[in-house]
Every structure is written in C-alpha cells, then in structure tokens.
Amino acid sequence: MEGWDPNTKSTLTRIPLLTTKAGPRDGAAWTQRLKEEYKSLIAYTQMNKSNDNDWFRISASNPEGTRWTGKCWYVHNLLKYEFELQFDIPITYPATAPELELPEIDGKTQKMYRGGKICLTVHFKPLWAKNCPRFGIAHALCLGLAPWLAAEIPILVDSGAIKHKDDAATSAES
C-alpha cells in the first residue's frame, strides 16, 4: 500500500478481509464465502454512508449469488451521474476477479471492453491476484470501480459522450 493516498489506505484497511477460498462450484464453502462477502459489503456501505460518500447499491440477483446487479453513481460538477452496474462471479472466483459492467456507457471510452466491462487489467488485477482470497466484491468496488469512475466519468462528461439525465430530458423535449 506504499504510495497510496491516505484516504484510500484508510478505507481499504477498514473493509473486512475474507478468509474462505471458495467459488460458485464449492457448495457449502461457497455459502460461507457469500456470508463473508455480504459482511464485507455491509461494512463498506456503512463506512461510505458515515463518511457521506455513498455511491453504489448492489445485491445478488440470483439465489446462488453468482449474478449481481445494482446502481453506482458519480457526482461531477455538482450533478449526479447514475449507471446500471452488473457482474457475474467467475467460476474460478476468487482467483479471478469479477468483470464489472456498466452497460449504459458501453463503447463510450477506450477503457472499456465489449458489453460495458470496465478495464481493470493494468492496475487492479495484479493487486487482486496478490491478495486472493482475502479480497472480495467490496474490494473490487473500492479499488476497481471507484477509481475508474473518478478517472473516466469527468472525461466522458466534459467530452459530451455522456449527458446528465436532466440535460438529456431537456434536449428530448426540444
């Protein structure tokens, strides 16, 4: 964590680490891993809310806990930009990080793969591999999605690639 800004380091150290090394094919061990994932996500969400930094909502969208959906948002120039968020837990999880998808902005930036999967290969994937199986979904959001949103959304807004929902509604009425 050398070279990280103090806020990121502080946030990361307060997200509970996971202990169960299990993926979707591992039966009861996967159920235990899911419990740890929820505990970590709840702690991260509560921490964000207490710091007035609430920026996502997700939940498992199937009983197996292998498909997750929700919303994330980023505030730029005092305007809130909200996006659908989805991802599947890979069969090789936790050795392989989930590929976080923002389908609404698919194709609007070069730092995204087909289907709206955000590019995390250079910076996040080595960190994930080094910390497997201790990292989970909350860590992927904190160290993967949050910095991606902070880097990409201002550029996309300033270039006109994405518009605020109020601007889009105004131009649709014209």
Image (tube, rainbow, N blue to C red):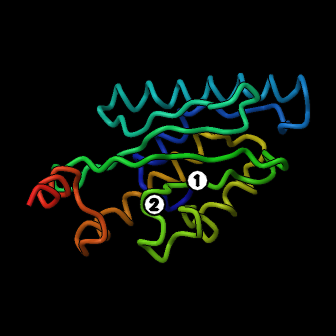
Spatial CA span between label 1 and label 2:
11 Å
Name the image quarter holding residue 69: top right
In the rendered image, the vertical position of residue 22 relative to residue 28, given as above or below:
below
Which residue is drawn at the image coordinates 47% and 72% (left, top)? 107
Which residue is drawn at the image coordinates 78% and 32% (left, top)? 19
Of badges 1 and 2, nearer the viewer stands 1
Quick check: 172 left or right of 17?
A: left
In x, y percent, where is residue 174? Answer: 8, 61
Quick check: 137 left or right of 44?
A: right
Quick check: 128 left or right of 27?
A: left
Q: Which mark is residue 100?
A: 1
Kindly check if marks 1 and 2 are in contact, taking CB atoms under 8 A apart as contact: yes
In the foreground, 106 or 132? 106
In x, y percent, where is residue 129? Answer: 75, 57
Within 10 angstroms of label 2, few (less than 14), some, or many (20 or more) residues? Answer: some
Name the image quarter holding residue 68: top right
Tell me which amino acid carries mark 1: Leu
Tell me which amino acid carries mark 2: Trp
Q: Please tell me whether mark 1 sits on a helix, a strand or a loop.
A: loop
In the rendered image, the vertical position of residue 34 relative to residue 11, given as above or below:
above
Q: Which mark is residue 148?
A: 2
Q: Please tell me whether mark 2 sits on a helix, a strand or a loop.
A: helix
